[in-house]
Image (spheres, rainbow, N blue to C red):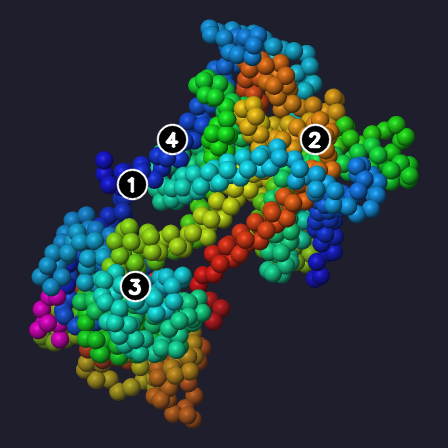
Amino acid sequence: MKPSRWPLACLISVLVFFYLPIGFLVMNSFNASRFASKWNGFSLRWYERLFERHDLLAALMNSLKIATYASAISMILGTAAAFAMNRYRSRFQQAHRLLVTVPLVLPDILMGMSLLLLFVSLGVKLNLITITVAHVTFCLSYVALVVQARLQDFDFHVVEAARDLGATKFQAFCKITLPLLAPGILAGGLLAFTLSIDDYVITYFVKGPGSDTLPTLVYSMIKKSKDLPVINALSSLVLVATFATVAVSQRLTRSGTVRD
Amino acid sequence: MKPQRKSEFLASAPSFLWLAMFVLVPVLIIFGIAFRPALAGGGIGSGWSLEAIRALADPSYPILLVRTLWVSFITTFACILVALPVAYAMARLTPIWRSRALLLVIVPFWTNFVIRVFAWQQILHAEGYLAQMLRAIGLLGENDRLLGTQAAVVMVSIYTYLPFAILPLFAAAEKFDFGLLDAARDLGSKPLGAFVQVFIPGVRQGIITAVLVVFIPMLGSYVIPDMVGGADSQMIGNKIAQRNFNDRNLPEAAALSGALALLVLAPMFLKRKGAEA
Amino acid sequence: MSDEMGSFLRFENITRKFGSFTAVNEVSLEIGQGETFSLLGPSGCGKTTLLRMAAGFDRPDSGRIFLDGKDITLLPPELRPVNTVFQNYALFPHLSIRDNIAFGPKMAKHDRASIQRDVDAMLELVDLKSHANQKPSQLSGGQKQRVAIARALVNKPKVLLLDEPLAALDLKLRQRLLVELDAIHDEVGITFIYVTHDQGEAMSISDRIAVMNKGVIEQIGPPAEIYETPRSSFVAAFIGDTNFLDGRITEVIDRQFSRCEVCGFGTITIENDKPVAVGDLIHLSLRPEKLNVLREMPNPAISQNIVRGEVEDVIYYGSHTRYWIRCGEWKLCAEMQHRNFQLNESRPKWGDEVWLSWQASDGYLLDQYRAEDEELLTLPDEDA
């Protein structure tokens, strides 16, 4: 029986729906006109303007710094959490699992609000560190999720085989477990990195004055309707960077699935 | 401590303590600060006060709550409705095309969320191509707007959350035995009948997950109503931000957040209870 | 063979429990040097747990394990002169075949030249020289198995443990690798402990077999001894197929034979495999291939049993045919090699009246009998 063509048509329309706004944005970044509704010919002037804005560059550096620290810390904490949840079946692990799930389902605004209240109650000054702490908190859960999925089809017999062939626990971990899980851990770290770069809501709540990240600065520019075409140019560059990251992570995932 | 307990503790402690400190404690603090008095300068006073709780009786809040629930519901429903045939179509592709389609679905959502909403803001702009086109064919009145409406909020929310609905449904559809559809057709069902009677029950677990991952974040929606919605499409999230950043009244923001937290966590606990029973 | 070899690997009163489930219960076992010893039994019988304790992946709750006179019960796996061939090979997917085999010698910190030499010798032994630089995912199932064997043997272990090494392979390949494994054993001459649930594999490769069930060893002995003189109904049914008959001794003819009445069947002559007395309840195992299916009634002899029956089912296997024959209240399975029939002779078919005959010495009296073991008897498939 031939399957109906309707679902396929749905899939294609949805993909068009997904990419149209992005394409529109990239197109507009080359529009000489200040307004999106009029095409005044091809121009690179918004890109030139972009490089004159040093506050955007500073915000980008902040974003990159935070994302690097947050993904590194969450890779370590998340991998340890995934190992514990995969390995042990105690009541303590049930609580652990619940705690790891909460950031995945908690709306961003609640997470931002609750962390703000925590920092205010503790009298902590809001700055880049508070943002990093907030980012680690939600990135950790995603890393744990990705690594745990990898652990589920990890054949622990290869670790036993290494022990059998004379490796100590530590040697087996370094020479077998870690190399085999590295693609999964890196994929989790990349996901954490993009989530951190992407985050607006939580950052907005826990950022101090003057410590803008790229999303919070862009957001305030949009709210003030200032230099909107420059945002188009910036977005296009961010898109290119994002697609490059996706391509790299795809390669990592693929090499990770080559298995017998 | 037995060696097993010790290594379990060593592996779990870092993430457990981190999450306890930065998730569990903060959520509890929300409920604590809701009972504190607000200071004029934006600080939190000492002592206890029911003022923030009393402020929840504000007559504008029930409308806000109903609107939040309604927009979240409509968005969730639309996402599931679209994601079902999409997941079905993806699961029936050859394995190579299946992973390509999956990548195509995911990639746009690796781009910045604020930027995506900004793109929509431009598309829906009163002078934009879409508005001009709709006016030309008479679907949009001369004075009607696209931006600043509840419809715009729902539209952009669907755009944002649709992939989160597609992914769990696709995971469920991939495990679905499509021979069952042939069997249903063989026993006399029409194509749509087979889809509704056999496929949808078959991916039930995926639908439940999809509903949760769309509906719960929607309840806390803040950026989308702020950027593409108008005064009549504000949601609870916007009110929390307003109390926090404009009014500098942390206890009232906390009280609202506490109410939202209860709204979000209640279905989760009910689900756990149901799973245990 | 086993007697003069003494005990090289010794298990002493080993017990291992998982929660309320007793996987291994007070097992004692001695295995000689250079022996190929099989642990045979259904899944969950404790054979793999015993093997894992020998390898060091698991520790007994009580009891001790000795290797070459040394207590190794608590020794971690990396310090035991024992290596394992895993059921699903457990090759390191990120390492080449050469690096997989070199893993053990590298861990032992051998010098590079000797590692190179040993690995080459192993690649030669398992005939995989041309694949040395490939990854495990590029090999076939049989080749992966050979890498797993080479990777274990290169360490020159005192004992090689094989955990269902052929279970993942198809029948033809299994038979070929079994022959290769036997050849490798002859070449290296070390002790092999072979865990399997396949009685055919165990019978063809082993010097001795331990048949395990529910955490205990039911019988230990050379394959022929286990097949011909099973000590329990479980062993009789698990090693090959058999018919069980229950009866009561009515007359002890002499030291060798007795008469026994089987309810709903008649009176038969049996050999006294153990001391019997009038009135004893006995359980008899009767292998299908020992039964003759005849169209005419044969001439009765003193030690021969002759029973009349009706063919209820016939399954043709090419080299032989199985008959299920109804005799009174019992249904017996008989197997006939085809060379026993003349070409022009018509074979018994469904509904035919036939005669079954067997020598009294063809049956075997069981020491231990459990009715549920009859379930292990293979029945004809419903849709065959």
Q: Nearer the viewer, mark 3 or mark 1?
A: 3
Q: Residues within 10 Å of mark 3 (few under 14, many from 20)?
A: many
Circles 3, 2 touching at the beta carbon (< 8 Å): no
Magenta region: C1-8
Query: Can you give x and y, in whole percent of width and height, for residue B24 in the image?
Result: 44, 26
In the image, residue C7 lies in the stretch drawn in magenta: yes
Residue B17 tag number: 4
- In-front residue for pair B104/A249: A249
For label 3, the residue is C103
Q: Nearer the viewer, mark 4 or mark 2?
A: 2
Instruction: Say above or below: A208 vs C39.
Output: above
Query: Can you give x and y, in whole percent of width and height, for residue A81 in the image?
Result: 40, 40
Q: Residue at x 42, y 82 (%)?
A: C318
Chain under label 1? B
Circles 1, 4 touching at the beta carbon (< 8 Å): no
Q: Secondary structure at mark 4?
A: helix
For label 2, the residue is A222
Mark 3 and mark 1: Cα distance apart in space: 27 Å
